[in-house]
Image: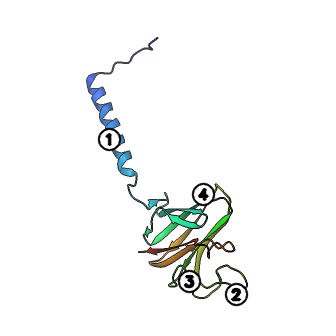
Amino acid sequence: MRGPSITLPRHRSAKLFGVILAAAALAACSTPAASPSSDGGGGTAVDVTLSEFKVEFNTTDIPAGDVTFNVTNDGTIVHEFVVFRTDVAEDALPEQSDEPEVNEDDPSLTSMGEVEDVEVGSTKSFSANLEAGDYVGICNVEGHYDSGMHIHFTVS
């Protein structure tokens, strides 16, 4: 059974079609086509994926300013994610002498923020204001950094 139909005068139909067309065009233009994406607060959002034993970004082309790291654990064990500003190579960060972890207090590293205990299948976020320079993101759970969980990225 058909419901009642509404007939609009021609000029209103054309006007309504124009409004719908303009709204669709605006929606298409407002969605970023390339990463990084806006985080809604005027900064940049970077999606970080952790798994055994790697760290992946949706982009490593990150502009200076406010950056939100959305960290998802796609692995099978708990991970964490720490960002350092440093000129040290990503695979040569200073480690604790008594544990297989990066020494987060070493003067060659400036911690920019972190999320701890990212459970399997969950996402945690943190934001930092990053200046232009070199950065390294790592998982600093015991043994994970040495197993390859690190990534270098440049902020420009």
Q: Residues within 10 Å of mark 4 (few under 14, many from 20)?
A: some
SS for dot 3: loop
Secondary structure at numbered mark 2: loop
For the point 43% across and 14% down, which residue is it? 4
* Disc 4 residue type (three-letter): Asp
Of the 4 image quadrants, the one containing the C terminus is: bottom left
Q: Is residue 135 left or right of residue 113?
A: left
Residue pointed to by mark 1: 22
- Splitting the image into 4 quarters, where does residue 6 fall? top left
**Would you call the spot at circle 2 few (<14 residues within 10 Å), some (14-19), or many (20 or more)?**
few
Which badge, 1 or 3, comes first in the chain's sequence?
1
Whole-number angstrom distance, CA of label 2 to CA of label 3 = 14 Å
Q: Secondary structure at mark 4?
A: loop
Kind of residue at disc 2: Ser
Instruction: From the top left corner, tell me how far across and down residue 97 is, in percent.
Output: 70, 87
Q: Earlier in the sequence, mark 4 or mark 3?
A: 4
In this rendering, the label closer to the viewer, 1 or 4: 4
The answer to which image quadrant residue 16 occupies is top left
Q: Is residue 100 shown left or right of residue 127?
A: right
Distance from disc 4 to disc 2, alpha carbons, whole Å, reads 30 Å
Look at discs 1 and 3 and give the one toward the viewer: 3
**Which circle, 1 or 2, is nearer the viewer?**
2
The residue where tag 2 is placed is: 97
Tag 4 near tag 2, CB within 8 Å: no
Q: Residue furthest top?
A: 1
Q: CA distance from mark 1 to mark 4?
A: 39 Å
